Amino acid sequence: MPQPRIKIFTRSFDLRLYRIARGLFCGWKDASGAEVPCVRLTDKSADGFFYAMLRDTAADIAISIEEDCFVTDPQAVLDLVGTMQEGGYAAIGCSDGDPATTSRNPESMCPFFCVLNLTLIRTQFNRRDIVRLPEDFEPYYPFFRWLASTFPVLYLPARKHRDGISTEVIDPQGRTLCVHSWYSRFYGLPACVVRLFEPSQGSQKARIDALAGEAYALRGMQKPRFPFAERVFFIGDWIVRWCIKVPQRIAGWPGKVKRRIARKRAA
């Protein structure tokens, strides 16, 4: 069996958080000894992120690792590629309906960590077949619904981290692959701002930093420290991301209102 070209993709908003997460997957080697490329994708919608992967014809297998997902066992992650090839799976990841994730849609996979067989998916992929329904809470639900109805997929078990918020993803052999923090959109924001959107939550930075530090410690690695000049650059990148994100969000409001009305009518 020929060695597939693996590429790691990260949908990223916060460059500092991306750099922290990237330190846990940068420099991996595939079975042939070649370094696995890492791609940071910014300003992508939740579903457009996956379509961007499919357009990258230099990749046969995509590993999606979001910037608030910290890898604890890189070999176990890479072993999933072999599992995917042997089982003929189009996707491997944990279910969005798992109580340890969101308990919303058991058919969809959580995008924070999943492995996609791009070569297989491309054989049947057509954007016109991806239909969004009024009850779809997340933009990526239609894509994963189509995947599950078209190809074999493998759902991984998940469990809550001891902090009561984060999610640990487990491989078929029982190894912990990674831990996902959730609420990274509030990373660096004060508690008063966070509570405007999530009344039950407070400041997230200390918790997420501690989770990343735990992953680095498990790997026997030193969590990166950034000099002043880099921290200033991170702030500049963060401002640029917001300048792009706000108009994108405003442009999407009419569609969200229509879907909300449709959901109420359907109920």
Image: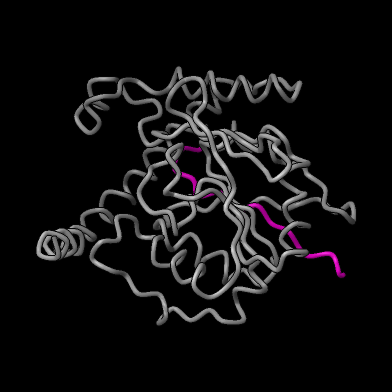
Pick the residue in front: 236 or 258. 258
What stretch of residues is rendered in magenta?
Answer: 1-15
Point out residue 141 in the picture as x, y percentages from the top left corner. 39, 61
Q: Is residue 13 on the magenta stretch?
A: yes
**With 256 as the anchor, is 119 left or right in this view?**
right
Q: Residue furthest right?
A: 32
Where, quadrant-wise, is the C terminus in this rendering? bottom left
Point out residue 173 in the picture as x, y percentages from the top left corner. 73, 41
Pick the residue in front: 226 or 190. 190
Point out residue 191 in the picture as x, y percentages from the top left corner. 28, 20
Residue occupying image coordinates x 41% and y 56%: 46
Residue 211 picture quarter: top right
Pick the residue in front: 49 or 260. 260
Residue occupying image coordinates x 56% and y 47%: 113
Residue occupying image coordinates x 44% and y 59%: 107
- Residue 96, placed above or below residue 122: above
**With 260 as the anchor, is 201 left or right in this view?**
right
Total numbered labels placed on residues in the image = 0
- Residue 232, placed above or below residue 158: above
Residue 224 picture quarter: top right
Pick the residue in front: 134 or 206. 134
Residue occupying image coordinates x 75% and y 48%: 78
Where, quadrant-wise, is the N terminus in this rendering? bottom right
What colouring does the structure picture have?
Answer: one colour
Point out residue 84 in the picture as x, y percentages from the top left corner. 71, 61
Q: Is residue 231 on the magenta stretch?
A: no
- Residue 7, placed above or below residue 170: below
